[in-house]
Image: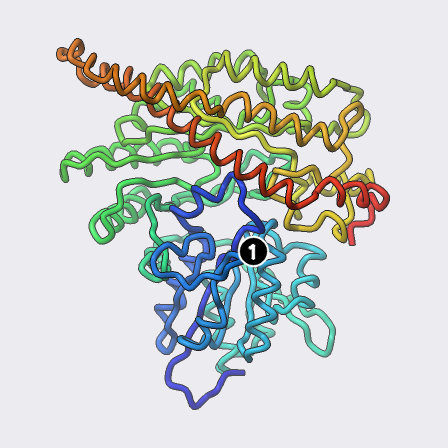
Amino acid sequence: MLDRAKKRYRFRVIAPAYPAFNIYSNIASKTTALGPVYVATAVNKMNNWDAEMIDENNLRRYGPKRKQGGADHEFLQQQRPADVVGFYGGLTSTIPRLYEIALFYKSKGAVTIAGGQHFVGENIIEALTHGIDYVVIGEGEETVKELLEGIEGRRDIAQVRGIAFLRNREMITTHPRVPLSDFDKLPMPNFSLVRYAKIKIYPVERIRGCGMDCEFCTVKGKPRAACPERFLEQIRLLVETRDARHFFIVDDLFGQHRDDTIQFCYKLRDYQRQIRLRLDFTAQIRLDKAKDSELLLSMRQAGINTVAIGFESPIAEELKAMNKLIKPEDMLSFTKIFHKYGFLVHGMFIFGYPMPEGVSFKMTAQERVKRYRQFIRRARLDTIQILNPIPLPGTQLRERLKRQKRVYALQEVGWEYYDGNFPIFEPDAPLSAEEMQLSARKIMASFYQFQYFFKIGLNILLFPGLIFFLTNIKLGWRKWYRPWRNDLVRFMGWIIMKEWNMNFKKDRFFEKLQSARGQVGHIH
């Protein structure tokens, strides 16, 4: 329990640092995670609590940093001692760092709480034996407020729904909490609580849940949506109080609740006209939404310029294994439609997806690389991301690979490698784990190259050519901007990959992999 003599308590929620530099590091330094912001906002509304958030991947504004990366929590605890510390476990690769910080805060007498997608099944007891006092299961905005009242001694903790904790060395799991559906009762996320961060790209949300049921995904359940007016108010608040211009809509599938989505887009269009300002949005969407011309038109008018699409694979057999009900040839035609409407298309792929039991399919690494390169070239994608399959906790993919005894032992290939850049299970023959990883990097390396540095300069020289489009300046800008932007991004991607490769060589991952092969199937 807390010191009852104190008049106010401090709650600090932390998003742990990535284990090492990776392809997400650059973008992570410009944004933050939305879930912890919601939790900090909810706590900050409580009568006797002050809340703050620390994002260890974004400490660009006077942040107290360690040389090894992440925040200097010794300094933070000296300057502003936290009574209760919450930890964001939404990214499995950050879990070792999460436990490291949790143990530090426990040594300082703080109460520790953790929540996020990682904490399911056996991972809950893992957390409770690695420095965490309470695990929040499911969404945290309502749960954390009741839990803090319990920690204060004003409520019976065992009656708080949706948590797990140890009592006399026995794990107690309380009744589950019904997922939130009335988002209007939540306060608007307060980004001013994110200390030390410079945020350029603001995460915003309208819909939680996704009904597509992909085998590899942790997001399940019936989609639950806020009303269009509330979503617009999120954006208005950020524009008018934080001068926000760039947004990432974190919904797993933009376009769910179609009619409300279109209504929101038109409201957002009208708002931008009213304030005479053009905003920039990126949204995640399914390829087959290309068939909905009204939706696409409303999105473009709203300022949604970039769509992130999970193509996953250009190989039909792999798409079927993932429960993706689409054919590679249809993916090309749908992509062409998105480009026709003026969207920049970011393609996300999974290389070497494992086949389910009873499916006989074999393909060499060389043939797979060839198929991917051909597809990416034909689709004329603006940017790409190639990852290895990740059997994340709580997914059907992980359960299947565990049954097949193909997951590498955590003692050798730990949670820090669960970011999609490393092979963490024995792949289908004839692929080897080394081939699976190197092939994904090879595809990325053929897309992001140093040569685009010279094309950037060439496109700048061509800029005066816009004079020939004076009768349709918007068309001329689009024809010039897209290749210039893509050349710049591809060159920057080359720099990021070069730095990632340097860090990879220092890590000696393949040596750990050799040891892990002898322990396949022994998860703990």
The quadrant in which the C terminus is found is bottom right
Residue 2 versus residue 31 in the image, above or below: below
Q: Residue at x 80, y 41 (%)?
A: 514
Q: Residue at x 74, y 51 (%)?
A: 410
Q: Does residue 43 appear left or right of residue 476 in this picture?
A: right
Callout 1 amino acid: Gly
Q: Residue at x 68, y 72 (%)?
A: 166
- Residue that mark 1 sits on: 89
Residue 455: give x, y in percent of width and height: 37, 18
> Which quarter of the figure has residue 44?
bottom left
The quadrant in which the N terminus is found is bottom right
The extreme right residue here reads 518
The residue lying toward the viewer, choosing from 226 and 287, is 287
Residue 111 versus residue 191 in the image, above or below: below
The extreme top residue here reads 468
Q: Secondary structure at mark 1?
A: loop
The residue lying toward the viewer, choosing from 354 and 76, is 76
- One can see residue 363 in this view: yes
> Which quarter of the figure has residue 162?
bottom right
Residue 417: give x, y in percent of width and height: 65, 45
> Which quarter of the figure has residue 269?
top left
The extreme bottom residue here reads 5
Residue 113 versus residue 332 in the image, above or below: below
Residue 202 versus residue 350 in the image, above or below: below
Q: Residue at x 33, y 28 (%)?
A: 305
